């Protein structure tokens, strides 16, 4: 083994240990997985139930991927919270001082948390999203037909995992900036839920550029007129996350622990 | 070796640490003494790079803390506020910290054993008693086998056995040539543990001196004498250089005579003695004596400020 010294890789290893050794983070991930897969199954079964009472137009309007991936909203909020508590848990307990005393350069902690969280979330959510679609498709194939190779469907299924990962990163950045669990979760929910309902409603011109709309446009196979193109939406949302992370990095360097 | 030069921390109008300059040498236990709110914790956090100084600097082993490639092997840190995630077990907490430096699992097991945490290492730290939390903090501090130890109120919350254990541990670490710097607001605790003292009040340096010197400075050579014939004995002892005070019936405080002289006088007269105790000034009293000027100066200054 090489000499004792702090390296980016070792900090990442440390963050991996931290992530899996606290019950709250593990439970949050399980909740996200459960809500994505579980609601896919339930929505699929419910659609079959309703088929008999649907008008022909309604039946024609149903898209399997839209139905079975409906649980992504719940998973989205859960994973945003995961990103938040991955760091605010350290600030509220005082653990952050032990962390920063071990890694006084500080920024490696942010990058390590980001890498570990994003890798773990994407590695779990991509198969979860694919599985949800596969199971949902099997359930709904009784009345409807759709395939991963249909236009935009694969993008939405994979994109769901991408977006869930990006929201985790956003939560992490907000956690570093706000430092309190309640404050950071409130900020995250304000950005994802309140902003589109208020600013988005009253100033329709900027609605497509809000983080939530930009994100949605990437996981929609049938975009509405006022939506950004999928690629542009993804890029814009990545830019929002990057800005939040840059702010987190600047504050982490500057502030007293 | 810790070098603090003109170290200052201001929070808006308030100056928590005011131009502190002192050196903490290896091979000894140095006590950092002062009342609560004197700026001890802030100073320690600045030494460990957690808080940025408003002015001045602090060096550990000749370098700013953050410039060490493996800081845990340089400085072991125990902060007063617990720096432990309550939801994580003690062993996982230590493993996570060790991982940042590539410190192996064996060392983690060593410090767990050394601090007597074997039985509880798998339990969540949130359920720990104050004493066990302190032991875990000390285990974290020892993880990198550091040359310098900085400990903020390390005996806080420990039972008497734990206090003794910490005292012996720290003395042992200093004897190995390490730098040991610990804070306390309890002067009696410092008298038992420290060789050298850095005393602060309201963020300012009040004294920087060996413990023995502080005790001598304010030594008060009184002897307590208990005897059923106290009045008779007082008459026999009184002289131009000897002052006798009756503390309570049957108990005298004698100044100007040694315990041996008093004992001899009593024996000559056939007076029975029940107690003969030389009173050494406690560190507490010596400290009060030492800081009296600083305290009066401050009291005067604030009175002036009010008058103005």
Image: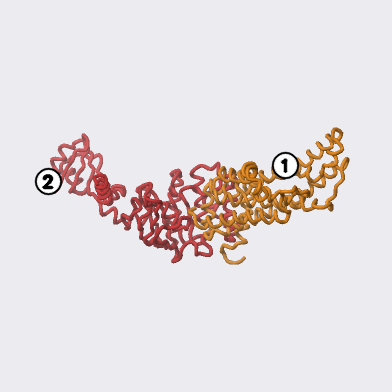
Chain colours: A orange, B red
Q: Is residue B259 left or right of residue B166?
A: left
Res B56 label: none
Q: Give SS at disc 1.
A: helix
Q: Quadrant of the N terminus of chain A?
A: bottom right
Looking at the image, how many numbered discs can be counted on the residues? 2
Q: How many residues crowd mark 2 within 10 Å: few (<14), some (14–19), many (20+)?
A: few
- Whole-percent x and y of residue A19? 63, 50
Res A35 label: 1
Chain of the residue on which disc 2 is drawn: B
Q: Residue at x 36, y 58 (%)?
A: B20
Q: Nearer the viewer, residue A175 or B266?
A: A175
Instruction: Please identify the residue farthest to the left as the structure is shown.
Output: B240
Q: CA distance from mark 2 to mark 1?
A: 93 Å
Q: Tell me if I can see residue B91 in this picture.
A: no
Q: Give SS at disc 2.
A: loop
Have a look at marks 2 and 1 and say if they share a chain: no
Mark 2 or mark 1, whichever is nearer to me: 1
Residue that label 2 marks: B239
- Whole-percent x and y of residue A21? 63, 48
Q: Nearer the viewer, residue A14 or B124?
A: A14
Q: Is residue B246 left or right of residue B155?
A: left
- Whole-percent x and y of residue A148? 83, 51
Kindly check if marks 2 and 1 are in contact, taking CB atoms under 8 A apart as contact. Answer: no
Q: Is residue B91 left or right of residue A141?
A: left
Q: Nearer the viewer, residue B119 or B2?
A: B2
Chain of the residue on which disc 1 is drawn: A
Q: How many residues crowd mark 1 within 10 Å: few (<14), some (14–19), many (20+)?
A: many
- Whole-percent x and y of residue A228? 71, 52
Q: Nearer the viewer, residue A159 or A201?
A: A201
């Amino acid at each position: 083994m090489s000499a004792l010294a702090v390296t980016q890789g070792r900090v990442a290893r440390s963050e991996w240990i931290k992530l899996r050794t606290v019950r709250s983070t593990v439970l949050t991930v399980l909740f996200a997985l459960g809500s994505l897969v579980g609601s896919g199954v339930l929505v699929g079964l419910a659609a079959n139930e309703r088929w008999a009472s649907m008008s022909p137009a309604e039946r024609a309007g149903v898209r399997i991927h839209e139905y079975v991936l409906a649980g992504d909203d719940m998973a989205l909020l859960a994973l945003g919270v995961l990103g938040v508590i991955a760091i605010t848990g350290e600030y509220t307990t005082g653990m952050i001082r032990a962390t920063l005393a071990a890694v006084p350069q500080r920024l490696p902690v942010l990058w390590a948390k980001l890498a570990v969280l994003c890798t773990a979330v994407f590695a779990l959510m991509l198969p979860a999203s694919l599985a949800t679609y596969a199971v949902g498709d099997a359930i709904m194939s009784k009345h409807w037909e759709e395939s991963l190779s249909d236009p935009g469907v694969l993008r939405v299924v994979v994109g769901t995992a991408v977006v869930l990962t990006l929201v985790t990163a956003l939560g992490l950045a907000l956690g570093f900036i706000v430092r309190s669990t309640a404050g950071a979760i409130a900020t995250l929910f304000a950005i994802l839920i309140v902003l589109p309902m208020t600013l988005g409603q009253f100033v329709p011109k900027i609605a497509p550029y809000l983080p939530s709309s930009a994100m949605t446009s990437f996981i929609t196979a049938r975009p509405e007129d006022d939506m950004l193109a999928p690629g542009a939406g993804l890029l814009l949302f990545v830019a929002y996350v990057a800005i939040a992370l840059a702010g987190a990095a600047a504050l982490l360097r500057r502030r007293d622990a | 070796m810790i070098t603090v030069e003109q170290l200052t921390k201001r929070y808006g109008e308030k100056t928590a640490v005011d131009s502190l300059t002192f050196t903490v040498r290896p091979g000894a236990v140095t006590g950092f003494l002062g009342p609560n709110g004197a700026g001890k914790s802030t100073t320690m956090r600045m030494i460990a790079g957690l808080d940025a100084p408003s002015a001045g600097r602090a060096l550990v082993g000749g370098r700013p803390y953050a410039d060490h490639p493996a800081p845990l092997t340089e400085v072991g840190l125990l902060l007063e506020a617990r720096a432990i995630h309550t939801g994580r077990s003690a062993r996982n907490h230590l493993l996570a910290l060790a991982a940042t430096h590539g410190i192996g699992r064996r060392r983690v097991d060593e410090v767990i054993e050394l601090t007597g945490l074997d039985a509880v290492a798998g339990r969540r730290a949130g359920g720990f008693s104050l004493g066990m939390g302190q032991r875990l903090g000390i285990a974290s501090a020892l993880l990198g086998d550091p040359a310098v130890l900085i400990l903020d109120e390390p005996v806080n919350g420990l039972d008497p056995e734990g206090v003794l254990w910490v005292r012996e541990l720290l003395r042992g670490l200093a004897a190995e040539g390490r730098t040991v710097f610990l804070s306390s607001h309890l002067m009696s605790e410092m008298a038992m543990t420290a060789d050298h003292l850095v005393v602060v009040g309201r963020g300012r340096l009040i004294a920087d001196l060996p413990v023995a010197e502080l005790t001598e400075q304010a030594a008060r050579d009184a002897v307590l004498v208990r005897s059923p014939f106290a009045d008779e004995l007082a008459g026999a002892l009184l002289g131009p250089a000897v002052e006798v005070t009756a503390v309570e019936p049957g108990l005298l405080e004698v100044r100007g005579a040694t315990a041996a002289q008093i004992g001899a006088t009593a024996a000559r007269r056939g007076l029975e003695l029940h107690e003969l105790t030389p009173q050494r000034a406690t560190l507490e009293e010596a400290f009060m004596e030492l800081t009296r000027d600083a305290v009066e100066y401050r009291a005067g200054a604030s009175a002036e400020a009010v008058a103005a």
